[in-house]
Amino acid sequence: MTSANTGTEVGSFASRFNLQQYVVYLGFLAIFLFFAFMLRDSGFLTVRNLSNIVLQTAPVTIMAIGLVFVMSAGEIDLSIGSIVAVSALTAAVTIASYGMAAGIVAGLGAGILIGLINGALVAYVRLPSFLVTLATMGLFAGVSRSMTDLRSISVTNEAFTGFFGSGSLLGVPSLIWWTVIAIAVGHLIYRETRFGAHVLATGDNARAASVSGISVPKIRLAVLTISGGLAGLAGLLYAGRLQAAKYTLGETDLMTVIAAVIVGGTLLNGGKGSIVGALVGSLMMGMLNNGLILMGLSVSDQMIVRGLIILTAVAVSLRDKSR
Amino acid sequence: MSAPILQLQDIRKNFGGLTAIENFSLEVFPGEIVALVGDNGAGKSTLVKIISGVHPPSSGTITIEGKPVTMSNATMGRAHGIEVVYQDLALADQQTVYMNMFLGREPLNRFGLLDRRRMIDETEKLVKELDVRIPSAHATIRDLSGGQRQGVAIARATHWASKLILLDEPTAALGVAETAKVEAIVQSLEQRNVGILIISHSLDQVFKLSDRICVLRRGKQIGVRETKKTDKNEIIAMITGLQQQ
């Protein structure tokens, strides 16, 4: 007999399932409707504004994908903001001398390398990822500042800025292509591959994963490397869209990315998460940003309101999970 | 009787200068339940680790179906057909039953992606065979009761074990009704023609389930008795060492 044994168990299972799965979508819808109504005369609902939101959130969405993997494995990566700046600057400097291809390789390579350093320290030196990436966050914030003496480096290579920023293919802006492809690939790997399953198992119960033959250190190394690589890609997207790289890129993204991932249904302690949820979370953060500006709030008021909304969203999405 | 499925000969295990196990020998036959009993610190968990492959013995031989084997981790133990149901169950609580059944050994379809259909089908089949009453293969482990979780852990071991299932205190955390249910599952495993080694503190359970009882004290094997030909007093005397005086 495999049918339900008690009514209450199935009932609580169903309610938890619903709340966890849909809170981000409901929140997204609520905020969308709120702005659509409040800002109906301020251009919030125009195609131009809405597509702008997606374009602006592309780097955050890409970083959020990496963080879903990291957090699902029970780790954290605080260094992604610093990686963005180092990668963007590395790419910008390399492009100026060696062209686009070398710039892409150097920019992504810098991100992957920093991710590998984080991952190796966590996986093989067995340091907690919180402390490792807190340290590398500061370390590489310093590196990005010293790389060009705080100067901004412009990116004039049109192929590069088109590919990563202002260009479009089949009428769809390249940043949307990047977002869609990254989400699709990320979701597939996360949900449908052995690697994704092993990431979740590691974050859920590292001992169980280990006695089941999963190499827990390799998983930890892999997720932090992926996160570094995706933060590097986010750096390229910033450099492409802004046609310049500066040490300030990515500086304030960490909180937004973490909020997007958690609101999107990924557990801080690992074992459960969602790539698509992170996308919706990221779009929600972008929409919030956009709507508050259009409402005419001052920068300080925006920060306060955003903080309160993130707090509410996180509280609601964690309410049932932390039991 | 047929050939033993597992044979331990003169097993010794040292940790630095400490001898945890010495001169331990035991045979387990297919279709037989052997209980391993002993007081706390007698070396039961060290033996579990030796048999599951986690710790290689310092000396002595492990023979599986007549072939001597050397193992240095649990993956090698599993490759030899030995599965362990750990005391903490080693289940990933937020994953589904079927993902836990195949944890670390997920089947892939022709695209190289997880073959969920196959995992779900095989899980449902086995769960039915063993009469583990869970809501569905899709249920999340943490939504299950203690007995159901234990059932899932045993089902997983049963699915993969071709030679031996090692059960470490399978009912230590369970209530009366759930204990009876798990005992029934363990008993039904005998038909599968694998060897079963069960570690338990409950002598009632040991006498109910086992064919033979092996007593361990201070790292040494004190004796093996056929369950039908012994009684609790003798086993208790062996565990506590009073018999030797």
Image (tube, coloured by chain):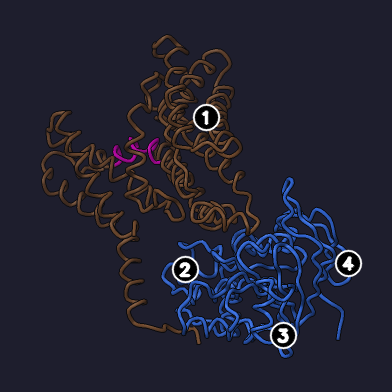
Chain colours: A brown, B blue
- For discs 3 and 4, the disc positioned in front in the rendered view: 3
Q: Is residue A159 above or below residue B185?
A: above
SS label for mark 4 = strand
Please indicate whether residue A23 sits to the left or right of residue A218 in the image.
left
Marks 3 and 4 share the same chain: yes
Residue type at mark 4? Answer: Lys
- CB of mark 3 within 8 Å of CB of mark 4? no
- Do the residues bearing badges 1 and 3 touch, measured as CB atoms within 8 Å? no
Residue with the mark numbered 1: A111
Residue B11, how many percent across, how many down?
A: 81, 61
Chain letter of the residue carrying label 1: A
How far is mark 2 from mark 1, CA to CA?
A: 37 Å
Q: Position of residue B84 (x, y in %)?
A: 65, 67
Magenta stretch? A51-61
Q: Mark 1 touching mark 4, by CB under 8 A?
A: no
Tell me how far mark 2 sits from mark 3, CA to CA.
Answer: 32 Å
Residue A53 on the magenta segment:
yes
The residue tagged 4 is B67
* Residue pointed to by mark 2: B141
Secondary structure of the residue carrying tag 3 is loop
User: Residue A170 occupies which quadrant of the picture?
Assistant: top left
Residue A13 versus residue A251 in the image, above or below: below
Q: Quick one: label 3 or label 4, which is nearer the N terminus?
A: 4
Mark 3 = which residue? B211
Local crowd size for mark 3, using a 10 Å CA cut-off: few (<14), some (14–19), many (≥20): some
